[in-house]
Amino acid sequence: MAAEDILILSDRDVMALAPMKAAVQVMKQTIISRSHGDLVSPPREMFSMDSTGLVWTPGGHRQLKAMGLRLYPTGVPKGDQAVLLWDSVKGSLKAISIGSYLGLLRTGAIGGVAIDAMSRKDSRVVGVVGFGEQAWMQVQACIAVRSIDRVQVYRRSRSLLARMAREASREFGVEVTPVDDARTAVANADIVITATDSPTPVVYGPWIDPGTHVNALGPKYTGRSEIEDGLYSKASLIASDFPEQYLRDSSFAFRSHPATGGMRDLASIIEDQVPRKDDEITLFLSHGLSGSEVCLLDFVHGRAVSTGYRAAARVHTD
């Protein structure tokens, strides 16, 4: 691949170049670098045009000399996504990732960082509510950082649930068991993952046992939240990868809840390395750290260059 080439990556290319375990490490370093001032991560922005819109999450990394953004539409049947990477010194466009996988990998890997930092080291059982693409990646990340024996999964579509559980068992090499309801999914789980678009709670505080860690990916807004207020009240430690984005949003459901005053940046938990008590409940609010996609694409681009990987497409510039 010539130095002037712009690498154009498909989902398949990203899968080949970035295994989950490596992605978790990239996201861990990205989150830490933000606390040191190396990652520039402005809040996401968007505009609306009638019933559609466009969202962009820009960012850059000083040490990597990388900058770029992720773009995706809203309110449309097919939401094609793109992540663009520039050299921040030369201004040259280095890579474009087209498709959804890099975004899914990024979110899953950040979830893996949270699980590694906030869950008990002896966690063995995972409970999942909303077993779709996002949850699949969270489970994959969980297996990358913990020795998991069993995964209990629930989603409303019974046929999809059964098929995905079989596929997950084969791919992950662990027991993945479909269950009949959300409460059964989280029962006796050491780690709970919620990944739904439900406007009403699917998991309640009283269901969560002492010592459990929860990764919440779905809505957390006034009148539209997948987790119930009691879960916030039970958690002794609450963190996010991008707490400022939540707290600047007036629609954040628990903005005025006493627990949010102590919401911590995930980076501080990683760096402080404070031992957690075995009986405490911890809660991670996944948001999607702006600029993290750019860092992950920079890693993928570097892997392609160092291995001589031939992507499906490249554009040569003079």
Image (cartoon, rainbow, N blue to C red):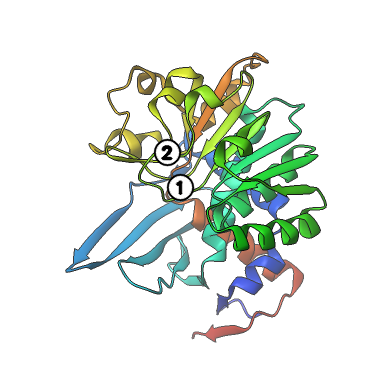
Q: Is residue 272 above or below residue 30?
A: above
Measuring 62% from the left and 39% from the top, which residue is drawn there? 185
- Measuring from the top left, give residue 208's x and y in whole percent: 57, 25
Whether residue 142 can be seen here: yes
Position of 123 with respect to 13 (left or right) is: right
Task: Mark 2 and mark 1 in contact? Answer it, CB < 8 Å.
Answer: yes
Q: Quadrant of residue 277?
A: top right
Q: Amino acid at mark 1?
A: Gly
Q: Is residue 193 above or below residue 234?
A: below
Crowding at mark 2 (Cα within 10 Å: few <14, some 14-19, many 20+): many
Position of 248 with respect to 101 (left or right) is: left
Secondary structure at badge 1 equals loop
Q: Is residue 129 above or below residue 69?
A: above
Q: Nearer the viewer, residue 217 or 298?
A: 217
Mark carried by residue 242: 2
* Label 2 vs 1, first from the N-terminus: 2
- Measuring from the top left, give residue 18's x and y in whole percent: 68, 60
Mark carried by residue 288: 1
Position of 107 with respect to 251 (left or right) is: right
Q: Quadrant of residue 257?
A: top left
- Measuring from the top left, give residue 253's x and y in whole percent: 30, 33
- Measuring from the top left, give residue 219's x and y in whole percent: 39, 44
Secondary structure at badge 2 equals loop
Q: Nearer the viewer, residue 16 or 296?
A: 16
Q: Amino acid at mark 2?
A: Phe
Q: Quadrant of the N terminus?
A: bottom right
Crowding at mark 1 (Cα within 10 Å: few <14, some 14-19, many 20+): many
Q: Nearer the viewer, residue 197 or 280?
A: 197
